[in-house]
Image: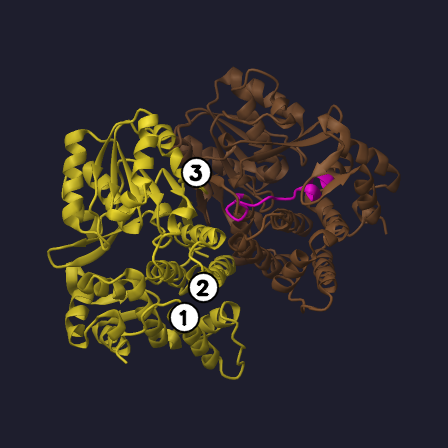
Chain colours: A brown, B yellow
Amino acid sequence: MENFSFYSPTCFVFGKDTESQAGELVRRFGGSKVLIHYGGGSVVRSGLLERVKKSLDDASIPYELLGGVKPNPRSSLVYEGIELCRKEKIDFVLAVGGGSVIDSSKAIAAGTVYDGDFWDFYSGKLIEEALPIGTILTIAAAGSEGSPDSVITKEEGMYKRGATGDAIRPKFSILNPALTQTLPAFQSAAGITDIMAHLYERYLTNTKEVEVTDRLIEALLLTMKHEGPRVIADPDNYDARANIMWAGMMAHNNSCGVGRSQDWNSHDIEHELSALYDCAHGAGLAVTMPAVFTYVMEHDVMRFAQVAVRVWGCSMDFAHPEVTAKAGIEAFRSFLISIGMPKNFDELGAKEEDIPKLVETLCRGNGRDGSLHGFVELDESDCTKIYQMMVF
Amino acid sequence: MENFSFYSPTCFVFGKDTESQAGELVRRFGGSKVLIHYGGGSVVRSGLLERVKKSLDDASIPYELLGGVKPNPRSSLVYEGIELCRKEKIDFVLAVGGGSVIDSSKAIAAGTVYDGDFWDFYSGKLIEEALPIGTILTIAAAGSEGSPDSVITKEEGMYKRGATGDAIRPKFSILNPALTQTLPAFQSAAGITDIMAHLYERYLTNTKEVEVTDRLIEALLLTMKHEGPRVIADPDNYDARANIMWAGMMAHNNSCGVGRSQDWNSHDIEHELSALYDCAHGAGLAVTMPAVFTYVMEHDVMRFAQVAVRVWGCSMDFAHPEVTAKAGIEAFRSFLISIGMPKNFDELGAKEEDIPKLVETLCRGNGRDGSLHGFVELDESDCTKIYQMMVF
């Protein structure tokens, strides 16, 4: 195991009706004037936004509103949020929504106190200071409620890039599984896929002797394998929603990823798809991961065999471990299809003729050096082949 | 899953040579005058105490020293520590040692700022305020480095009791697996047993639909099953030590125990043994757990069968699940014996004729109501039978 530091000082308040505690939590973590940041209609229609406003009113905490966050959140709204926070002397950002809303809130929180263009953070600069952030999560997926990460798309060039820093870990996150019960099946499935991607990206490591984190990742994958189909079959299953919601946080707060190299090639390869086609990130990952895994499997056959046996229940072929490894990848692909995810470019709405453009942006855009540096180093030729594997 | 709140704002600094960061970490978390609290000879002999003092000196942070913590830490030293902290205007307690040292430090940290007898906290009062605490861990066992808990023995009556409160969660914990390499095999094994007890105490739940935490607990048990024998066979195995150290923290910071009822009967039953005979807590648990589990197995046979299959690799006897459940308990007992733990009263140094006294203190001492209220409610008659099962 490698040396590491792990610091996750987020207070998680989990369960039914917990959004009513928003006001007192903002107060506890030092907020006196709040930006409520959210997306579109669903938090308004469901009455959630009104309940949050009431909770702040009850705690005598004034607020400004900024809605309009879209999936794959854009830089233009971040600039608008920063301006609003500065003008109104906001000292706390409250995200009400999913990963896109939380990531946009994190960008605003960091940008407000930064004397420069917030996009610097999304070009490699560590975030060391930000307004405090709270979240009320409405979809189990991104893990942003417990992570130090944020992903934003810059309209100019359509670069989808990440930023990180402990300063943007939320002070509190309210996780009410009941809020996710109204999600359409497709969005639930995309969230499940994203959570499993966060686990696989950590599982694919070049660090040896990492039994504890291997086992923790497998535990969370097994949870998703068990609970995923249950929420697709029965969207109102609170318990299955609850298990997925905690797994989604644990998958990405990094307690299962410490002390080991991680991959993140699949995320990078997918980000080009959701940036260009505006597809759901999880749907893009469902198409991307089986292709990437098949392409890199030879790099460490026993690692893929291990997850095949321990998570997917494949029999170990001791004479031909690569058969087991491949069977595990195919079992994962079948699982994703079974919960309603697309399997190829066509179903995703992507176009084969765009591959050169995807590869160019992926490997050269926004200052990149021509390669991806995850589990396996992938150059432009590798990435071209991987995208081509998604066309079938 | 039940509603819960989870707040673990401890900064974990993990890996080789990390104790050299003690001074800067104390500074970062607001300490300006430190009590270094420790046990006996080993941290002096190994040079660890000198390295810690040097790190504080380098950061220009003054300190007082208070050694002498014994296993099963006593209230008398806590009173001494409180007096010293008040007199010297200490504002940060740095524990250098194992669970006993950390628990004693927590008691001192809470007692110093409390206008009353610190024992109130060990009689049921929640700890809401304490001096900030840091830890440098020297044995993977108690999980106190990441927990809101502390256990102290009051000499008057020899009551061994626990206290809790988020205020005593350490601000930082330095986890260097190399510091545990010099431990005698017996202490390593006792630590392994304690960690596994923390997992079983959470596994034995009456809450339904807790897949995610079941899987996380099983993951950590599997880690201990794999790594435990490796450190007993090869005490210098850094990687095995590292896996156990992170598992020990994760087992007890409660991320795998949220939203479910927990047991803790085995801990209560054992505490009487280590209080009376001053045996190692882990050794007492090794004798206690198989007896308790066998006694309560009928309460939920399928839960014991599940851990038997998933962790101990037992075949499921679908016609007779109780056979599988029992096989899992026996596999756990055999595992504990294989790493050098005692199996019965005799090997532990306990005496059958003391059973009435043990039961009286357990069920009636320090204000208890005659029963234990864990996975199964156990009255004096039950506890008597359980102690008797340890005599064979």
Residue B391, percent from left and from top: 26, 78
Q: How crowded is mark 2: few (under 14 residues within 10 Å), some or many (20 or more)?
A: some
- Mark nearest the camera among 3 and 2 is 2
> What residue is pinned by disc 2?
B229
- Mark nearest the camera among 1 and 3 is 1
Q: Residue at x 23, y 71 (%)?
A: B379
Q: Of the residues shown, which amino acid type is indicated by label 1?
A: Ser
Query: Is there any visible trace of residue A279 in the rendered image?
Result: no
Q: Is residue A267 magenta?
A: yes
Q: Mark 3 lies on which chain?
A: A
Q: Mark 2 lies on which chain?
A: B
Same-chain status of marks 2 and 1:
yes
Q: Does the magenta stretch include residue A362?
A: no
First in sequence: mark 2 or mark 1? Answer: 2
Q: Which residue is drawn at 41% across and 60% down?
A: B199
Vertical placement of residue A237 versus A107, above or below? below
Mark 3 and mark 2 in contact? Answer it, CB < 8 Å. Answer: no
Specify whether A234 is left or right of A389: left
Q: What element carries label 3?
A: loop
Residue B4, percent from left and from top: 41, 50
Q: Which residue is drawn at 51% across and 54% down?
A: A212
> What residue is pinned by disc 3?
A9
Q: Mark 1 lies on which chain?
A: B
> What residue is pinned by disc 1?
B338
Q: Residue furthest left?
A: B156
Mark 2 and mark 1 in contact? Answer it, CB < 8 Å. Answer: yes
Same-chain status of marks 3 and 2:
no
Q: Give the range drawn in magenta.
A: A253-271
Specify whether A295 is left or right of B291: right
Specify whether B70 is left or right of A157: left
